[in-house]
């Protein structure tokens, strides 16, 4: 194979549709735009326009606050971890970390870490090394004979700031 012989697979690329090139093309005359009116013309931006009336999205007050440095954790229930153990995807002897959960297919990508939640039942003794855990998850892990280590910067229910309404 030579560089000048490299091609895309058959059917991998399609030629773009040339609109407005006659009735025989199938996209002639109105060029797929329907007929008449502002939306048939070019340069239309009327998504939130209400005929001059103050649009709804501008009438309503702005609410809330999005923290600029918020952490994005994978939230994993204990039941999901037990299913992975039963399927033989997680090693019970090794420490359960973000990397091992990604390798087992429990979470798709590492993000900012893993937070264990208490939904489901854990019957296997495991050692966890994660960013955080709910109180019920920590109790369930202790009941099963395992232990949990919080990584630096992790969040537990006890250390999380109280939500105010």
Image: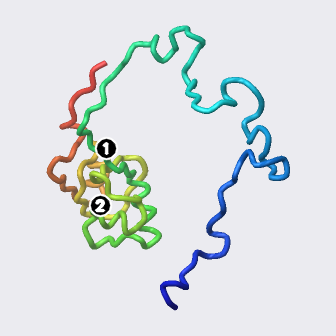
**Which labelled disc corresponds to residue 98?**
2
Task: Name the spot of residue 102 as percent of width and height, x first.
Answer: 36, 64
Frontmost residue, 26 versus 158: 26
Identified at 35% across, 63% down, the residue is: 101
Quarter of the image where one finds residue 14: bottom right
Lower sequence index among marks 1 and 2: 2
Frontmost residue, 109 versus 81: 109
Identified at 27% across, 47% down, the residue is: 133
Task: Name the spot of residue 38 as percent of width and height, x first.
Answer: 66, 24
Marks 1/2: CA–CA distance: 20 Å
Q: Is residue 46 above or below residue 13?
A: above
Q: Is residue 14 left or right of residue 124?
A: right
Identified at 74% across, 41% down, the residue is: 32
Disc 1 target residue: 136
- Image quadrant holding the C terminus, namely top left
Q: Is residue 54 left or right of residue 41?
A: left
Quarter of the image where one finds residue 51: top right
Neighbor class of circle 1 (other Cα within 10 Å; few <14, some 14-19, many 20+) is some
**Which labelled disc corresponds to residue 37?**
none
């Amino acid at each position: 194979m030579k560089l000048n012989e490299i091609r895309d697979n058959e059917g991998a690329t399609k030629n773009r549709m040339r609109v407005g090139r006659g009735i025989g093309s199938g996209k002639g005359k109105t060029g797929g735009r329907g007929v008449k009116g502002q939306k048939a013309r070019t340069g239309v931006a009327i998504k939130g326009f209400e005929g001059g009336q103050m649009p709804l999205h501008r009438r309503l007050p702005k609410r809330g606050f999005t923290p600029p440095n918020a952490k994005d954790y994978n939230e994993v229930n204990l039941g999901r971890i037990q299913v992975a153990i039963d399927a033989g995807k997680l090693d019970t002897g090794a420490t359960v970390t973000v990397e091992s959960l990604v390798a087992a297919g429990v979470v798709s990508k590492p993000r900012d870490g893993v937070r264990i939640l208490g939904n489901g039942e854990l019957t296997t003794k495991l050692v966890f090394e994660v960013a955080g855990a709910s109180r019920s998850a920590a109790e369930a892990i202790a009941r099963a004979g395992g232990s949990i280590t919080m990584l630096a910067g992790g969040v537990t229910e006890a250390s999380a700031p109280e939500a105010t309404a």
